[in-house]
Image: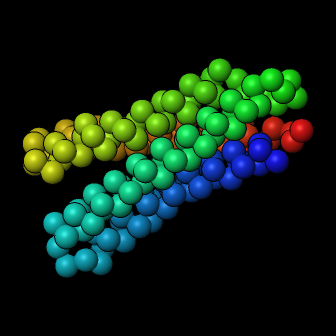
Amino acid sequence: MKDRLAVMALALWWGSLSAIAGFVVPMLFAHLPTPAMAGNLAGRLFGAQTWVSLACGGLVLLVMRSNADNPSVRWSFSAIGLVAISMLAALLVEFGVAPRILAREDLKLWHTVGSALYALQWLCTGLLLWRAARQPQA
């Protein structure tokens, strides 16, 4: 049961990352009157996504910890590492990259760094979801 909770949290995490970057933000830029308005709203969405990422990552880590003594559950150290990398990427975007974008510092550089960190988070959570979804349930 707890493993299914982890799969659901991973699905929410990866799905929300996918929806925001792949659908919602492009729609903002396509339909809002100015790029500045779209960028402002996109920034708010990415900020909210950070908290979704941290909540989902924390829940996954709690499930991993609660199953630590169960040999039938195969959460590996690499899975813990992927969760940690994903959560760190979310924090770096929110507290390292976003303030520089808001300050309009070297926008091309910081958008590239932010996009790379977001893509890293997306890839890590996707890999975690893939592994967790194919893992037999105990």
Quadrant holding the C terminus: top right
Residue pictured at 10% horizontal, 42% vertical: 105
Image height of 134 relative to 74, above or below: below
Coloring scheme used: rainbow
Q: Position of residue 26 (x, y in %)?
A: 36, 65
The answer to whether one can see residue 55 in this image is yes
* Most foreground residue, 98 or 32: 98
Q: Is residue 73 rendered to the left or right of residue 46?
A: right
Question: In the image, 91: left or right of 80?
Answer: left
| Residue at horizontal 77 percent and vertical 31 percent from the top | 67
The relative height of residue 65 versus residue 137 in the rendered view (above or below) is: above
Displayed quadrant of residue 42: bottom left
Q: In this view, does 100 lie above or below 45?
A: above
What residue lies at 48% left-to-right and 44% top-to-bottom? 54
In the picture as drawn, the residue positioned furthest to the top comes out as: 77
Total labels drawn: 0
Q: In this view, does 3 lie to the left or right of 77?
A: right
Tell me residue 125's x, y (percent).
57, 41
Residue 19: horizontal and vertical position, in percent?
A: 49, 61
In-front residue for pair 28/81: 81
What x and y, as percent, mark residue 112? 27, 41
Q: Does residue 130 appear anywhere in the picture?
A: no
Q: Which residue is drawn at 33% across and 36% down?
A: 92
